[in-house]
Amino acid sequence: MTGKQYFVYILASAQNGTLYVGITSDLIGRVYQHRKHINPSSFTAKYNVTRLVHFEIFDNPENAIRREKRLKKWNREWKMNLIERDNPNWDDLYDALL
């Protein structure tokens, strides 16, 4: 066990806006990249999807990858319910991580 953590996260453009599901081992760094539009042709840059509204932590990369793939297949309503379960106001969780 390396002690490394993996994060599955959901970004939104706004409450009830466009959603993006991703995975990373550096949540702060990855969300920063999305916010700064490091890749200007990316989906998140095109639709200004920068608000971190949900994340889950995993110790095992395979479990994180499996969860990300599962979430990507979920319909929009299920994703919105997941967000609203722990973050009913769709607050941006990024600043709390810093």
Image: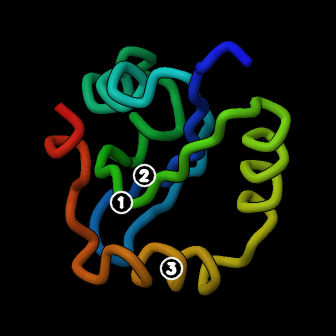
Residue density around tag 1, few if under 14, some if 14–19, many if 20 or more, within 10 Å: many
Q: Mark 1 points at which residue?
A: 53
Upstream in sequence: badge 2 or badge 1: 2
Q: What element carries label 1?
A: strand
Question: Image quadrant of residue 58?
Answer: top right
Instruction: Assess disc 2: are there few (<14), some (14-19) or many (≥20) residues with their C-alpha within 10 Å of its C-alpha.
Output: many
Q: Residue 91 carries which label?
A: none
Q: Which residue does the image show at 27% across and 71% down from the upper left?
A: 90
Q: Which of 42 and 35 is in front in this view?
A: 35
Q: Are marks 2 and 1 in contact (CB under 8 Å)?
A: yes
| Residue drawn at 59 percent across, 45 percent down | 8
Q: Tell me the tag on residue 11.
A: 2
Q: What amino acid is labelled 1 in the image?
A: Val
Q: What residue type is labelled 3?
A: Met
Disc on the earlier residue, 2 or 3: 2
Cα distance in 3D space between marks 2 and 1: 6 Å
